[in-house]
Amino acid sequence: MLLPVAAALTILFSASSPAKAQTATNTSLSSSGSSADYTLTGTVRSSTPTAAPAPTGTVSFVDTSNGNAVLATAILVSGTSSLSWDLFPPIPATGVSGRAQAIAVGDFNGDGIPDLVVATAGSGGAVGDVSVLLGKGDGTFASAINIPATADPAAIVVGNFVKGGPLDIVSADKGSGTNNVVLTITDGTGHLASQRYFTVPDFVGAIAVGPGSSSLAFLTGPAPAGLVIYKSNGDGTFAAPTTVPLPFPPTGIVATSFGFAVTNSANDSMTAVIAGGSTYAKATFPTGKGPTGIATGSFTSNGGADLVIADNGDSTVALLFDNLNGTYSAPTYLAVEPGPWGVVVGDFNGDGKADFAVTSQTGNTVSIFTGNGDGTFSAPEVITVGHGPQSIAAGPFSSGGKIDLAIVNTTDGTISNLLPFTGPIGTATVDKITVQGSGSHQIVAKYSGNTGYAASQSSAVPLEAPGSTVTTTTVMASPSSIPLGSSSLTLSLTATVAAAGTIPTGTVTFKVGTATVGSAPVTGGSATLSGVPPTTGKGFTVGSDSITASYSPTTGSEFAASSGTQSLAVTAPTYTITPSTTAVSLSQGGSQPVKVTLASTSFADTTAWTATTSSPLITVSPTSGTATLAANGSSTVNLTISAAKSAANHAPGLPWRGGLILFGVLLGGLPLAQRRKGGAAVVLMALAVSTLGALMSCSGGGGGTPSSPGYTVTVSATGGISTTIAVTIQ
C-alpha cells in the first residue's frame, strides 16, 4: 500500500475488435508442468452471452519474448463451459498517474454502468491521486480522471455523503500526517466538485462506510487501538468523531447489520462492535492466525451477517456464522493460496447464493469459492494475477450482467480484472512444450478466428525457460537496532542479489512487516534504500520487526525472482510521561484536572496514548489520543479524573460506624444492668465494649482515619511507556 515508484495501471480484459457480422471473442491461456515439459491450453469463447455454436478454428501458442516464435498450433475442440474465470488481455487505462494501491466501485456519472476509482501513490514528492475510470459497459473504461488527493493514499471507499448528490470518494494516508484524509465530492460526471480534508491520527489503512452512508469508520493503532467513527451530517460535513477503544491492534474492517466487525492480526481474533444509539458494545471471537481482510454476507439460510476473514498468517480463510443472538460460531477454516489478504463477497454465478473471492499476496493469485447456501463451498478456482495482489472489488463491468472482479497488485502497481463465463467454448491443448532460451518468457495464445467469430489473443502467461538463472537475495539493515521514532538515526536497507557467474539486474522492493517502505534499482548486484525513518507511519513497532527485500528481475532477462528477510530490533522510544501529580483526592461525585506531559529526548514521531482506570467508579476523560513530539520537545495532555457518587470513601463494610452504634446501645443498657446485677454487670459491659472495639480495629474500622480502596488511573503510550496516578476518596 506504500510504494513511491510510478507504474502503469492496466485493466486486464477483452481486447478483440469484431469485424462486421463477426462475434467478438475472448481467449485465455492456462499452463501446467515444468520448464522442459509444459502443457498449454487455449480456451476461446464469445465475449457476450450467445446460444451460437462454439468457436472453431486454430490456436497458436506464441513466445512474445523470443521474436513471436510459435511454440505449437492446435485445432479447437467444441464444448460447453460451466462457470469459470479468465484473466483477459490488457487494455491501457490511459492517464492514470502513479502506482495503484487500493480500489473501489461506484457509478460516478449516473449512467447505470459501474465505474472504478483507484488510489494511486505519488512519486518524486508528488501528491497521490484518486483516479476515476468511467465504465463503458463492455469491460473497457474511459481515460482516467485524476483528482489530487493526499500524499500516499492507502485506502479508498465510496459513499453518498451529500444527500441527493452523486457518489463521493474518501481516501486516506496511513499514519498521523496532518490532513491525511480527504473527502472528494464529485460533480455527477466523475470530476471534482470540492474537497474537504481532515486528520485521523494513527490511521492503519482500513475504512468502512456505515449503512446508507450514515458514517465513516477508521481503524487506528497500534496503541491505543481504536475505531474512530464520524457520523455524516448529509451535507458533506461530519459530526465530531466518536472513538471506540478496541482491545487489540486492528487490521481490517467491514460494516455489518449490527455495526462493524474488525480483525485483530496481533491477537488472531475478530471484534464485533455493536452499535446501540450513541454507545457501542464489543465482543471478541477467535479467527485463524494473522487475520487481515474481512467481508460479510449470508452464507446460510438464516439470513445472518456471516463473516469471511483472510488469515494471512496460516493461509486460510475463517468463516464465522452468525448465531442471530449476538454471538458467532467457532470458525470454519478453508485452505487458500499463501498470504491471503483481501476478500470480497458477491453472487458470482447468479444462483442466489453468496460466494467469495480472496487475494493471496504471496501466491500472486485469486481464489474464488462458490457457495452452496448451507455454509459449505465448492473447491476454489485459483487464477494467477499480477504481483502482490491485495485490494479487491466486485461489479458488473462487462456485458452479460455477471459480477467481475478487479484486483490491485501492489507490488507492480497494476490492476487485474477477472470475468466469469458460462456457455459454448472451444479448447486447444498442446503438451511436451519447451520454452527456448533462458529466464522468464511471456507466452500468449492467439485465436485465428473464422467467419462467425473474430480473432483474439490471450493475456501473457510467464513461463520459465530451462536456462533460467537462480538468484539469492539477502538484506541487511544498518543499524541493526534502532529506537522507535528516533530523530537522530535513520535506516539504510541494502539488498544483495547474487547469481552464479553473472550480475542480476532489476528492482528490489523493501517492506517492514507488510508495509512497503520503498524500492531501489539493482546496480552492481545490490540495491540500497537510505534514509528510512523508524516511525509508526512506516510500519515500525517496538520489538523484532521483519525486513523483507523482494527482487524482481528485469523483464525478459535470464534471472529468477527471489527474496530475503532479516529481523530488526526496534527498541522502546526515548520519551517520558510525567503527571502533574501522582496522587489525587476526590470527594464522592467530584473531579480534578491533571496535566500529563510527554517529553522527548530524541524521539520524533507521533505517539498514541490511552488512559484507563482500575474501577468503573473512577472515570477519566479523554480516554485516548495522540501527541506528536519533536526531538527535545514536549506535549501536554489535559485529563479530568472523576469519582462516581457511589465510590467508596472507606473500606468495605464501614465497621467503625457499627461499633459506635453498638457502643451507644451498650451504654444505654448500662443503668438497667446496674439495677439488676450491680457492679459485676458493669464489668461485663466494659469488657464487651473493649472486645468489640478491638475486633473493629482489626477489621480496619477503628483507631484512626478510615482508609479508601486503592483506585488508580494509568496513562500508557506507544512503546510501553506508562505512569500511574493514585486516587483516594475523601
Image (cartoon, helix red, strand yellow):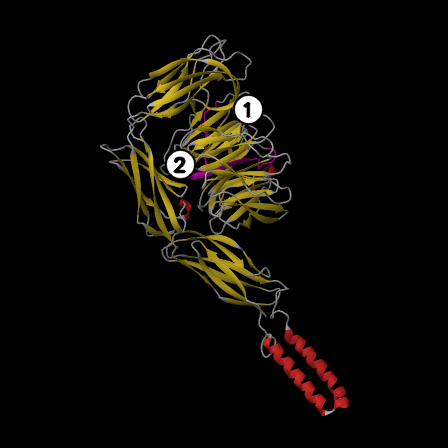
Identity, as a three-letter code, of the amino acid under mark 1:
Lys
- Residue at 56% x, 13% y: name it: 51
Image height of 682 relative to 109, above or below? below
Residue on which the image places disc 1: 402
Left or right of 211: which side holds 566? left
Front residue of 201 and 83: 83
Dividing the picture into quarters, in which one does residue 456 lie?
A: top left
User: From the viewer's perspective, is the residue at label 1 or at label 2 nearer?
Assistant: 1
First reached walking from the N terminus: tag 1 or tag 2: 2
Left or right of 192: which side holds 695? right
Magenta segment: 140-164
Identity, as a three-letter code, of the amino acid under mark 2:
Gly
Q: Position of residue 727 (x, y in %)?
A: 54, 66
Question: In what element is the residue under mark 2?
Answer: loop
Residue on which the image places disc 2: 122
Front residue of 401 and 445: 445
Quarter that holds the C terminus: bottom right
Question: In what element is the residue under mark 1?
Answer: loop
Q: Residues within 10 Å of mark 1 (few under 14, many from 20)?
A: some
Dividing the picture into quarters, in which one does residue 695 lie?
A: bottom right
Quarter that holds the N terminus: top left
**From this viewpoint, which residue is outermost toward the top?**
451
Q: Is residue 153 magenta?
A: yes
Does the image show residue 349? Answer: yes
Q: Residues within 10 Å of mark 2 (few under 14, many from 20)?
A: many
